[in-house]
């Protein structure tokens, strides 16, 4: 062995520990074995209208309820105080944009956690509110009554909601497995407390059906949820004018309204 070969060999030996350390530093840290609550939805999921979306909207309120009332890891004798929250809701979301943006992210999270063989880090609960932005434009389209144009618009939007919501809930159930709680919200009539209150009867019709419209949006939500063994948080008829932002805002709940919504989600879980 000549001197040059010896020097190269010594340098290589000296570099080995550093390379091993560098490789170790580049490895991602192990994810903590804590369960997760995953929230999807529109501006209600993000808490628009609340005085403090991080605390007083329905998602954080429901999260607090789950931490002290949900039993995690299926069969464990302890409640879920370590439950983390991942809220991926987007203000303005429709069923179409949820399928495009939130659903892939949610499925990836579920596959990572619920299919890794470690039940302690599972997504335990998924909540969804979606569909309101799909049908809200019907207020202007149907302002003159349930005309043929209005009826066609309703059927078109309902078909879109049905297709997208079925796809969403089916993929979530497949990725999550049978034990994860999936809770879907029906919508309250947001028109009763705003400047469009004269169209509140139209809101009731679109949401719950009636003469000329045997099936409403909420009926679709209930039916699709039942098909994947998801629970339903019923909010229709529970929020009055005092529970809504009102004025020019014809969509959003205020703090008291979000408390009612959170209670509806909690009741759905308890059932």
Image: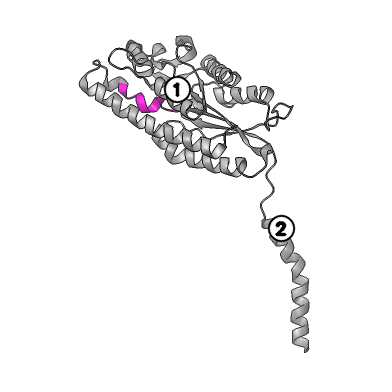
Q: Is residue 137 magenta?
A: yes
Q: Residue at x 38, y 18 (%)?
A: 207
Q: In this figure, which residue is indicated by the disc labeled 1? A: 222
7 sits to left or right of 212: right
Q: Residue furthest bottom?
A: 2
Q: Is residue 114 visible?
A: yes
Query: Which circle's residue, 1 or 2, is located before the other in the chain?
Result: 2
Q: In this figure, which residue is indicated by the disc labeled 2? A: 24
Q: Which label number is shown at residue 114?
A: none
Quadrant position of the N terminus in the picture: bottom right
Dot 1 falls on a residue whose secondary structure is helix
Given residues 46 and 41, the one toward you in this image is 41
Q: Tell me the magenta residue range.
A: 130-138
Q: Give me the C-alpha separation between circle 1 and circle 2.
A: 49 Å
80 sits to left or right of 270: right
Q: Quadrant of residue 236?
A: top left
Q: Nearer the viewer, mark 1 or mark 2?
A: 1
The number of discs equals 2
Q: Residue at x 38, y 30 (%)?
A: 162
Q: Residue 75 placed where, x, y %? A: 70, 29
Q: Residue at x 67, y 44 (%)?
A: 31
Q: Quadrant of residue 36?
A: top right
Q: Residue 4 placed where, x, y %? A: 75, 86
Q: Is residue 104 above or below residue 194?
A: below
Given residues 108 and 5, the one toward you in this image is 108
Few, some or many residues within 10 Å of mark 2 (<14, 14–19, 20+): few
Q: Residue 120 placed where, x, y %? A: 69, 37
Q: Residue 105 placed where, x, y %? A: 51, 41
Q: Residue at x 49, y 42 (%)?
A: 104
Q: Is residue 94 visible?
A: no
Q: Is residue 79 magenta?
A: no
State the colouring used for the structure image: one colour
């Amino acid at each position: 062995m000549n001197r040059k070969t010896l020097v190269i060999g010594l340098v290589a030996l000296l570099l080995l520990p550093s390379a091993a350390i560098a490789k170790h530093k580049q490895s991602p840290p192990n994810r903590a074995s804590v369960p997760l609550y995953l929230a999807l939805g529109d501006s209600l999921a993000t808490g628009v209208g609340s005085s403090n979306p991080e605390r007083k909207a329905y998602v954080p309120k429901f999260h607090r309820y789950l931490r002290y009332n949900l039993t995690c890891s299926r069969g464990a004798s302890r409640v879920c105080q370590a439950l983390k929250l991942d809220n991926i809701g987007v203000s303005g979301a429709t069923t179409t944009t949820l399928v495009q943006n939130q659903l892939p992210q949610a499925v990836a999270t579920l596959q990572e956690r619920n299919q890794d063989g470690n039940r302690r880090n599972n997504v335990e609960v998924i909540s969804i509110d979606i569909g309101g932005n799909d049908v809200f434009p019907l207020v202007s389209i149907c302002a003159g009554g349930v005309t043929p144009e209005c009826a066609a618009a309703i059927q078109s939007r309902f078909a879109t909601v049905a297709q997208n919501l079925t796809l969403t809930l089916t993929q979530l159930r497949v990725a999550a497995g049978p034990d994860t709680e999936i809770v879907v919200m029906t919508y309250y009539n947001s028109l009763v407390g705003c400047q469009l209150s004269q169209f509140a009867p139209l809101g009731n019709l679109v949401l719950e059906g009636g003469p000329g419209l045997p099936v409403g949006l909420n009926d679709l939500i209930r039916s699709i949820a039942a098909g994947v063994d998801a629970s339903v948080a019923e909010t229709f008829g529970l929020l009055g004018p005092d529970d809504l932002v009102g004025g020019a805002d014809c969509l959003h709940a205020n703090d008291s309204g979000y408390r009612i919504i959170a209670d509806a989600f909690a009741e759905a879980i308890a059932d």
